[in-house]
Image (cartoon, rainbow, N blue to C red):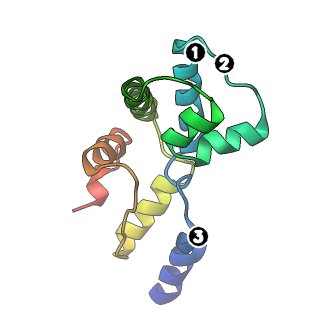
Amino acid sequence: MQEGFLQRVCYSMKPDEASDVLQADTRALKLNAWKQLASEEGKKIPEDGVLHRQVLYAGADHVLHKVFLWEKAETELDGLKSRFSQLYYENLLKLTKPMEGLKEWMDAVSTAGIPCVVVSCLDEETWLKLWSGWGSRSIFR
């Protein structure tokens, strides 16, 4: 019976198909950070679906040069990239809970003793701060 339970837990969320939205909706956070940066620079991001996709999935250099067409010196662009990272980080730390069902799923995995690996584009310190803020740090040893 336990083996069947473990298989159901393993495949219930299709972990091999997991993406960045499993932990939190980072796409909305990223778009919000770009909107905040544009506002600080006195610009506005048009409500265009194609443009939003480019902003969400392209690197900061591409967004600044090709999407926003901001003509600034390289040092100013580096400052904008740094400010974007800061805004994104601040927005990320404002999250009060993970995506619905994630904490329960991780608790079930931990209780069942299933090995788990976390893959994140965040540095370890930031990820642990975020995860412990959700009251979930005890899952990891």
Q: Give the CA distance from mark 3 to mark 2.
A: 34 Å
Q: Amino acid at mark 1?
A: Ser
Q: Which quadrant would the C terminus be assigned to in this image? A: bottom left
Q: For the point 40% across and 53% down, which residue is it? A: 121
Q: In this figure, which residue is indicated by the disc labeled 1?
A: 39
Label 1 crowd bin: few (<14), some (14–19), many (20+), radius 10 Å:
few
Q: Are the residues at dot 2 and dot 1 in contact (C-beta closer than 8 Å)?
A: yes
- Between 128 and 43, the residue placed more toward the observer is 43
Q: In this figure, which residue is indicated by the disc labeled 2?
A: 44
The mark that comes first in sequence, 1 or 3, is 3
Q: Is residue 25 visible?
A: no
Q: Which quadrant would residue 54 be assigned to in this image?
A: top right
Q: For the point 45% across and 85% down, which residue is it? A: 2
Q: How many numbered dots are placed on residues in this image?
A: 3
Q: Give the CA distance from mark 1 to mark 3.
A: 35 Å
Q: Are the residues at dot 3 and dot 2 in contact (C-beta closer than 8 Å)?
A: no
The mark that comes first in sequence, 2 or 1, is 1
Q: Which quadrant would residue 96 be assigned to in this image?
A: top left
Label 3 crowd bin: few (<14), some (14–19), many (20+), radius 10 Å:
few
Q: In this figure, which residue is indicated by the disc labeled 3?
A: 17
Rendering coords of residue 73 (x, y %): 43, 24
The mark that comes first in sequence, 3 or 2, is 3
Q: For the point 30% across and 49% down, which residue is it? A: 123
Residue found at the far top of this picture: 42
Q: Amino acid at mark 2?
A: Lys
In this picture, is 33 found above or below 28?
above
